[in-house]
Amino acid sequence: GGMGGVTFKPIMMFGMELKDARKIAVVMDVSRSMTRYLPIVAKELDKVAFGSPLVLYFGCGLQKPPRDMDDKVRKAQGDEFARFWQHWQGKASLRMTAEERKKLVYDPNTPMPLEAIYAQMVKRPNTYFIDFNGITYTSPALMCKEVMEADTIYWFADFQDRVDEAHMEEVFKKLKSRKQKLYIHASIRGRSFEQVRDKLVLPLGGEVIETKAE
């Protein structure tokens, strides 16, 4: 480029160039069936932009989070992450109330589900998660300060969960004000895929990544 001899390597994800991307952040749906893609996506991210922010969220819906919801972004380390992973990559019921969920504790004597992926996330720098809060509140992950510095957000999900037009408009405004593009990569084109593409991705100048994640 014309930046006094500074050349930027284009950022490619799965063979597709993210236009004008200099800094990328990834939001990843880890709702059990999706978690097998996590090492593939993390490897691809670290190949192109090592140590870039990666935020894990269980689900991919876009509905307005209730006021009192815990949507804090935490580092993927320590007992909090161990507890999250053990139960939500394990067998905890998605129908639990918030009160019941609070009582879950990490048991170091119980084997970790998907242990190799868990260990990889704990070791990876700049890796975060939001505690399980019911699959439809991804917006805090897309708008958190941990991804704020990136000019490009890459979101990998199946787009099966519910989205709300009015709330998507809020997300659009926030990302637009931060001059961020949103790219999505769908493992399958779930029922909300087209809405997310038409209301968020395309208006923000992003694209759909069509290649298979493998």
Image: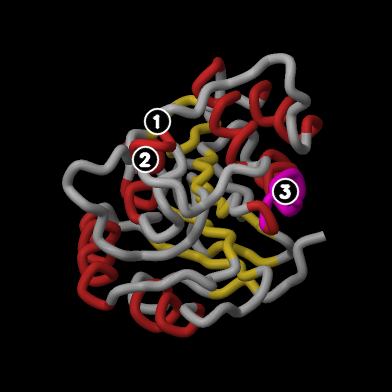
Q: Residue at x 57, y 78 (%)?
A: 190
Classify residue 74 as left or right of residue 93.
left
Magenta stretch? 34-40
In terms of secondary structure, where does tag 2 sit? loop
Q: State the residue lying farthest toward the left.
A: 67
| Residue 102: mark | 1
Instruction: Provide residue 10's location: percent of width, then percent of height.
Output: 61, 55
Alpha-carbon distance for marks 1 and 3? 34 Å
- Seen from the viewer's position, the closer of residues 100 and 74 is 100
Q: Is residue 66 left or right of residue 57?
A: left
**Which residue is disc 3 drawn over?**
44
Residue 149 circle label: 2
Residue at 50% across / 28% down in the picture?
A: 104
Question: 63 left or right of 92?
Answer: left
Counting from the top left corner in percent of width and height, residue 164 is at 29, 74
* Eye-nearest disc, 1 or 3: 1
| Observer able to see residue 24 | no
Local crowd at mark 2 within 10 Å, few (<14), some, or many (≥20)?
Answer: some
Q: Mark 1 Cα within 10 Å, few/some/many (few <14, many 20+)?
A: few
Callout 1 secondary element: helix
* Numbered disc in front, either 2 or 1: 1
| Residue placed most toward the observer, 82 or 15 | 82
